[in-house]
Structures are given as structure tokens and as C-alpha cells.
Amino acid sequence: MKSISLSHLFPKYEGQWVAFANDQSTILGNGKNLKTAITKAQKRGHKNPIMFKVPVGMTAYVGAC
């Protein structure tokens, strides 16, 4: 499994939900709450976007699914 860095999201999306396309890099929508981000993605034709909550502050995390 390939790791993906999402650190580029922090300056613009810190504390927000971000909706991604299946390619895991195209941002379809964002918002302060989950519903807003999903609605924006759905308006762009994506029924089931990949959701990510950008944390407040940069912290380290190492893990696996």
C-alpha cells in the first residue's frame, strides 16, 4: 500500500472536512461540517467521495489499515 502525504492541505483546509475523488488527490469539496463537504462533492457528480477531516495543528501519525 502506498502512503499519501496530505500535509499540503493544512494551510487552506485546517479544521475542515475535505471530499476527495477516487484518485485520492482531486478535491471535490470542503466545509466546516461533513454535510457541506459531501453536498459539494455530490453536486459535482460524485455520490460517494472519500472523506478526510484535516486536523487542527500538524501532528505525526503512523498507522495501517
Image (tube, rainbow, N blue to C red):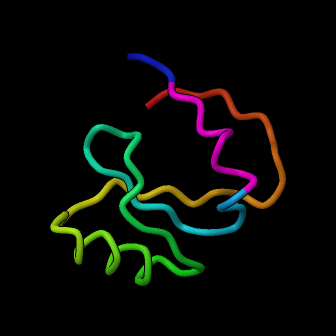
Quarter of the figure with residue 24: top left
Question: Which is more toward the observer, 54 or 45?
Answer: 45
Q: Left or right of 61: which side holds 64?
A: left
User: At which x and y percent is residue 5?
Assistant: 59, 30
Please tell me whether residue 59 is drawn above or below residue 48 in the rendered image.
Answer: above
Residues shaded magenta: 4-11
User: At which x and y percent is residue 40?
Assistant: 34, 76
User: At which x and y percent is residue 48?
Assistant: 21, 62
Please report the residue visible at 43 percent of the width from the left and 74 percent of the height from the top: 37
Question: Which is more toward the observer, 64 or 21?
Answer: 21
User: At which x and y percent is residue 20?
Assistant: 37, 53
Please tell me whether residue 52 is drawn above or below residue 61 in the rendered image.
Answer: below
Name the magenta segment's main secondary structure: helix
Q: Quadrant of the N terminus?
A: top left
Please tell me whether residue 3 is drawn above or below residue 38 in the rendered image.
Answer: above
Q: Left or right of 30: which side holds 50?
A: left
Please report the residue visible at 69 percent of the width from the left and 59 percent of the height from the top: 12
